[in-house]
């Protein structure tokens, strides 16, 4: 360029170049203005939000909603809430997945219509038969690809209140091609950078170690993506191993990952992550996990499993009664680093 | 190595070969399965200060019992920090993580990995789990190491879906796509060989054969043209001490091996 651009010319010539657009469907619009208004209207009163799984699912999750679960199926996962969604048959759900047993159960019950998918599998136990059946048959209508951090960063963008976040994952791959991300030339450095749209959930479901009745919630051990997902959710349902006095929260406010004003419902659910683990409290129930791995192999045996452990019991306590105190106690003593 | 080698199975071979690639005093992003066992073995053998990094937040765990999940309690057992996924991958994105250890269903000559679908994406023959943290590791760690069984169905000219970036279409392609400069696939550990990448062409090349395996066998089991340098090393078999630790300490319940 042989002359300096005037200010106005510089601005005009500086249109951002879109280098690539993922072909995947944008399952949820990053409506940050709507999200602000929603959050403004949300009650800031420190009210008692305790209720049962049944009431929380009935009140806050509707067919067609976009939901997210955290952490994932075998680790600190809101399984008592997942079971209740299956029990009530809330259908046509859109989900963000990172999932193991959690999303597997929803897939087994054919409740999922669309997935922002990063990983759905059974970890050391291999592929998810339910994912295979639901996707290969076309019953899941839309599968959009992302990386694990991609989904967490999309929650982070929503938590920041901005419509997208620039990242260096997913570039150059089919993962990006089948996502709803875009690649632009970064206006500051000129390098290609992936823009991931903010992911605002209709409903987030998170299981925690302790919370007070208003929803101030604390998590021990790794926090996965709880902080981001909680802040990316329009409605947030917390299940907790125990309900504590607010004074317990106030004694260690540094441990609060989720403040009450994000939360719509608080469910007391001891062993709420079963058969998954809850660090420092109980180990995973490997026998039950293997039971599901076996049962999920055919639609018939999967349905029998859901009948026995979900439809056949009225609530979470009745579910726990199927296992008995001795077995649950054994899981407690199997938890490494368990606090006395 | 030992004069009378002890018998071992394919998993044990993969674990031992992978473990030897783990350097003391480095940061290593550990994926599900074999990388976890290899990291545990490495910490007990030659790399007590291997800093394990697990995607859901565990940093610097001492692997005393075997993790079954990348978010499980073992991944932050006596760790130096328990944070979350963003912190971990952002740490890799800032260039702090040297090695990334991954598995895959298919790999091509440039080290691109598929864990998403076999067949067409929208009408798949087999729907696989998806990227998980794989793409983040392959994008942001300095050196990525893949661990896989070796056969023609897995080592293919073109993967059905590039889930995790290798060198993509060849030299310069990663940088052109915007991936961090100087990153990429480094090694492939298989049941038949240890493989690397040619410094110029970025195509996969044979570095060493596993015990009892011939170069021809490796070539026959690879569905693309593999570069064969003049000098091909012979990988030593797992030694008695490695096998003992693996069987008695790392996986005493025989969950994997």
Image (spheres, coloured by chain):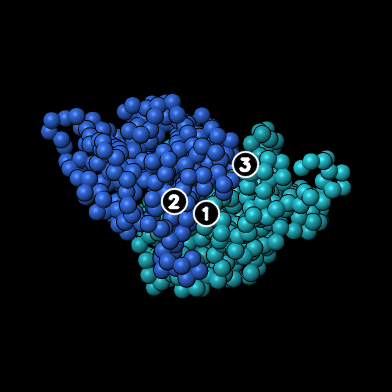
| Chain ID, mark 1 | A
Alpha carbon distance from label 1 to label 2: 9 Å
Q: Nearer the viewer, mark 2 or mark 3?
A: 2
Q: Who's the residue at 26% across and 36% down the image?
A: B231
Which residue is at a point 51% across and 29% down the rendered structure image? B80
Circle 2 sits on which residue?
B112
Q: Secondary structure at mark 2?
A: loop
Circle number at residue A173: 1
* Whether labels 1 and 3 share one chain: yes
* On-image quarter of the N terminus of chain A: top right
Q: Nearer the viewer, residue A308 or B190?
A: B190
* Residue to which mark 3 is pinned: A218
State which chain disc 2 sits on: B
In this rendering, is residue B94 above or below A302?
A: above
- Asked if A149 appears above or below B120 in the picture, the reply is above
Q: Earlier in the sequence, mark 1 or mark 3?
A: 1
**How far is mark 1 from mark 3, CA to CA?**
37 Å
Instruction: State the image quarter where residue B31 is shown.
Output: top left
Picture mark count: 3
Q: Are marks 1 and 2 on the same chain?
A: no
Kindly check if marks 1 and 2 are in contact, taking CB atoms under 8 A apart as contact: yes
> Is any atom of residue B120 visible in this view?
yes
SS state under label 3: strand
Q: Residues within 10 Å of mark 3 (few under 14, many from 20)?
A: many
Question: Chain A appears in which tint?
Answer: cyan
Question: Percent position (x, y) of residue A189?
Answer: 68, 40
Chain letter for the residue marked with disc 3 in the picture:
A
> Which one is in front in this view, the residue at disc 1 or the one at disc 3?
1
State which chain is coloured blue: B
- Name the side, left or right, on which A308 lies relative to A242: left
């Amino acid at each position: 360029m042989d002359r300096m651009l005037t200010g106005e010319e510089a601005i005009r010539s500086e249109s951002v170049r879109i280098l690539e657009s993922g072909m995947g469907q944008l399952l949820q619009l990053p409506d940050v203005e709507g999200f602000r208004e929603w959050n403004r209207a949300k009650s800031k009163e420190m009210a008692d939000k305790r209720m049962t799984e049944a009431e929380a699912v009935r009140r806050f999750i509707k067919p067609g909603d976009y939901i997210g679960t955290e952490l994932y199926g075998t680790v600190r996962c809101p399984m008592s809430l997942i079971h209740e969604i299956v029990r009530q048959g809330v259908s046509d759900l859109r989900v963000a997945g990172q999932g193991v047993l959690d999303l597997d159960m929803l897939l087994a019950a054919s409740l999922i219509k669309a997935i922002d998918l990063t990983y759905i599998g059974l970890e050391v136990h291999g592929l998810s038969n339910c994912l295979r059946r639901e996707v290969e048959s076309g019953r899941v209508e839309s599968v959009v690809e992302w990386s694990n951090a991609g989904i967490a960063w999309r929650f982070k963008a929503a938590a920041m209140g901005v419509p997208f976040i620039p990242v260096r994952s997913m570039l150059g791959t089919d993962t990006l091609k089948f996502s709803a991300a875009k690649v632009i030339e970064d206006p500051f450095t000129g390098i290609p950078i992936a823009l991931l749209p903010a992911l605002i959930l209709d409903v987030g479901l998170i299981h925690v170690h302790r919370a007070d009745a208003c929803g101030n919630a604390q998590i021990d051990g790794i926090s996965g993506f709880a902080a981001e997902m909680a802040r990316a959710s329009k409605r947030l349902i917390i299940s907790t191993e125990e309900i504590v006095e607010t004074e317990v929260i106030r004694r260690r406010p540094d441990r609060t990952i989720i403040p009450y004003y994000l939360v719509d419902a608080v469910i007391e659910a001891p062993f709420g992550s079963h058969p998954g683990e809850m660090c420092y409290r109980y180990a995973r129930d490997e026998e039950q996990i293997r039971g599901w791995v076996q049962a999920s192999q055919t639609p018939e045996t999967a349905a029998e499993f859901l009948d026995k452990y979900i439809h056949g019991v009225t609530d979470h306590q009745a579910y726990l009664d199927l296992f008995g105190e001795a077995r649950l106690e054994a899981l407690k003593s199997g938890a490494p680093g368990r606090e006395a | 190595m030992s004069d009378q080698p002890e018998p071992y199975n394919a998993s044990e071979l993969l674990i031992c070969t992978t473990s030897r690639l783990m350097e003391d005093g480095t940061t290593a992003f550990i994926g599900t399965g074999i990388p976890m066992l290899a990291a545990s073995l490495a910490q007990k053998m030659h790399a007590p200060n291997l800093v394990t990094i697990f995607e859901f937040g565990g940093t610097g765990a001492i692997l005393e019992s075997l993790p079954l999940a990348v978010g499980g309690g073992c991944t932050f057992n006596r760790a130096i920090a328990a944070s979350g996924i963003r912190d971990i991958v952002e740490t890799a994105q800032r260039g702090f993580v040297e090695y990334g250890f991954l598995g895959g269903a298919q790999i091509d000559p440039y080290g691109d990995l598929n864990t998403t679908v076999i067949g067409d994406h929208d009408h798949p023959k087999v729907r696989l789990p998806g990227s998980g943290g794989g793409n983040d590791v392959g994008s942001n760690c300095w050196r990525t190491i893949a661990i896989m069984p070796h056969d023609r169905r897995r080592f293919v000219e073109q993967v059905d879906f590039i889930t995790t970036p290798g060198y993509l279409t060849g030299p310069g392609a990663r940088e052109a796509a915007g991936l961090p400069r100087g990153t990429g696939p480094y090694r492939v550990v298989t049941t038949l060989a240890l493989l690397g990448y040619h410094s110029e062409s970025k195509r996969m090349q044979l570095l060493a054969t596993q015990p009892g395996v011939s170069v021809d066998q490796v070539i026959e089991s690879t569905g693309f043209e593999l570069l064969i340098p003049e000098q091909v090393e012979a990988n030593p078999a797992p030694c008695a001490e490695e096998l003992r630790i693996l069987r008695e300490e790392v996986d005493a319940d025989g969950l994997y091996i």
